[in-house]
Image: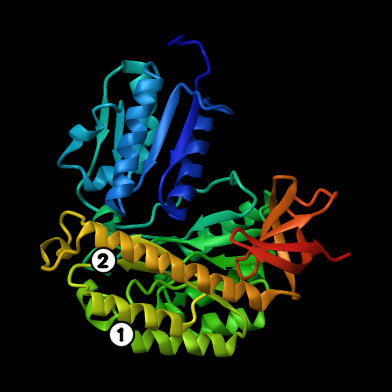
Amino acid sequence: MDPNKRRTFRILTLGCKVNAYESEQYAERLSEEGFIQSESDKADIFVVNSCAVTNIAAQKCRQRIHALRRDYPDSVIAIVGCYVQTARKELSVFDDCDVVTGSFDKEKLVPMIVDYLRTGNRMIAVSEDSEPVFRTSMIRSFHQTRAYLKIQDGCNQFCSYCVIPYARGRERCMPYGDVLAQAKQLVSAEHEELVLTGIHTGRWHDGDKDLADLMKGLLDHTPGLKRLRLSSIEMNEVSDAVIDLMKEDERVARHLHIPLQAGSDPVLKGMGRPYTLAQYEKRIAEIKERIPGISISSDLIAGFPGETDEMFAESLVNIRRIGLSFLHVFPYSLRKGTKAEFMKGHVNGAVKRERVHELTKLSGELYNEFKETKLGTVSCVYVEQKIGGMWFGHSSDYLPVYIESSEDLEGKFVPVKLNAYNDEGMRGSLIA
């Protein structure tokens, strides 16, 4: 590799919105060091921002690394994040990587890449101890129209199936003033919709300020902010103050993603979830009564240890009755070191796949029913890009909307009449 050449880089992001935000941080730090972001598949430096939430996610990381080493044998390959942290006792899986960085050493990633290029010595940093404080690292802009803003990291909940507390450490929050400063920077860079994200977003706090206070502060003190969205929030963290703000201020998106994980109390108990089905159903009904027409989506895990055919059948009935808008469905994935690893009654893979199929089918039915209720209504759509000759964006209630128009609508909020729907989303016409 020519030492005088300005090297290019690509960042490959797997996993959640928190990872997407952190990838933007890495990109900016690499650019500050003089590297150039590649506009093609090729690059001198590849950074894989890894995910470990399921075995499939970890497998995708390994496959991506092996493919990069095969296709670009002379490139530098770095891996960072959750999968590295959870695999810290078996780092041989990263033998194809020149730089290996765990979750608690992320700030070392770019200096380690620079050091590797200077010395040729393989770099590894995987600390075992969690960071005690939130490390604020501002970014100037985001690669897409809608911007994510990470306000929280870590989790103290320790659900029995989940590896994230081990991968991300204990809860910590971005200070109130830093959140406002980052929001102002992103909006000044023409990101007029912000998505607040974190591992446990609903538990954000700073002194006596909670999430509702933060949202109110952002709406009051960020000129140009036209929409504020929550990425995900636990049922028992959707406070009345958050709902009041959503009801009073149309800039707060009319969509909440509230994980359920199972529609059966014995399964919820085994998972270590902090609510019963009745409590979840009651809270969803209260939110829908306060904000008619709101979209509420959820996560479901199929085939958790001990889930019988009867429990799963009960789940299908209960989920339909609750009336969610759509579901994100995952098969249970055994993660080493979690309580569920040692539980009895692990479900056969074929049975899990069938249950995923049934839940996915139910999600499609629920989503079509929700889209049906929106036909003929007018929605404010934030246009993100052009796809197949049509403008594409999302409504406040997170419906994907396709619009025919000869105007350049990218980055604009436009009123759209919703005329039809299909599996991809809604079709609408621009209101003059």
Residue 423 figure quarter: bottom right
Closer to the N terminus: mark 2 or mark 1? 1
**In this picture, residue 412 sits left or right of residue 189:** right
At label 1, counting other C-alpha atoms closer than 10 Å, the crowd grade (few under 14, some 14-19, many 20 or more) is some
Please tell me whether mark 1 sits on a helix, a strand or a loop.
loop
Residue 39's place in the image compared with 16, above or below, is: above
Which disc number belongs to residue 303?
2
Q: In the image, which is nearer the foreground, mark 2 or mark 1?
A: 2
Work out which quarter of the rendered image holds the C terminus and state it: bottom right
**Could you say where residue 243 lies in the image, as x and y percent from the top left?**
55, 82
Callout 2 environment at 10 Å: few (<14), some (14 to 19), or many (20+)? many
Residue drawn at x 62%, y 81% as measured from the top left: 293
Amino acid type for the residue under numbered disc 1: Thr
The answer to whether one can see residue 247 in this image is yes
Q: Amino acid at mark 2?
A: Gly
Looking at the image, which residue sits at the far right? 432
Q: Could you tell me which secondary element the residue under label 2 belongs to?
A: loop
Work out whether 386 lies above or below 353.
Answer: above
Residue that carries the numbered disc 1 in the rendered image: 276
